[in-house]
Image (tube, rainbow, N blue to C red):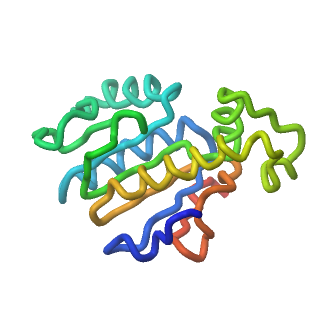
Amino acid sequence: VAPDIREIYIEKPYLLRYENINTEIKEICELAVKRMETGTVGIIVPGKEIKNLKDHLKSSNIQFEGFTQANSSSKLQIGTIKQVKGLEFDTVILPLKSKEQYVKELGSQGVVWETDSDIENPPENAVETLELFITNLYVEVTRARSGLIISYSGEESPILPESSDVNFVDRRSE
């Protein structure tokens, strides 16, 4: 069961949709810099995508650290779900939460999707993996003290909250 995110945060979480991954990464980095003005920011990234984010931050001269202990002096930390347990940030950003990324990550766990209906009604052998993904999403969203921003490009992951539960912003160009 997914957490009721409306009860966790001071501000209503944001769900941002982008045209493509490059635009998503660029704008997420800009958003992180803006949020650093008022507190700490943690960006939790799928493991295989972390290099792309780090490269963009470095090329933009944005200072950051990998996830460390809670006493870090860095306003911006990035890392994966495996590194974030026990840490908290004023704002947490969860980029790359698209349906494509979701299917790719599940595929890396040995779950093969043959049709879109498999995503909505998964085969029995996928239930344990899906429970792990939901648990990980719970860990990710509960790292935020007051602000949560989730983003994706393309189609949204089926495990994300309903648009009515968040501040939905479509950042695709018209």
Taking the image as shown, residue 161 lies to the left or right of residue 90, namely right
Quarter residue 169 falls in: bottom right
Residue 130 x %, y %: 65, 46
Taking the image as shown, residue 133 lies to the left or right of residue 60, namely right
What residue is shown at x 27% (from left), y 49% (from top)?
A: 41
Between 139 and 99, which is closer to the camera in this rendering? 139
In the picture, the quarter occupied by the C terminus is bottom right
Taking the image as shown, residue 25 lies to the left or right of residue 18, namely left
In the picture, the quarter occupied by the N terminus is bottom right
Residue 61 x %, y %: 25, 29
Residue 113 x %, y %: 82, 38
What residue is shown at x 31% (from left), y 25% (from top)?
A: 58
Residue 16 x %, y %: 53, 58
What residue is shown at x 26% (from left), y 52% (from top)?
A: 88
What residue is shown at x 45% (from left), y 75% (from top)?
A: 6
Between 3 and 33, which is closer to the camera in this rendering? 3
Taking the image as shown, residue 83 lies to the left or right of residue 108, namely left
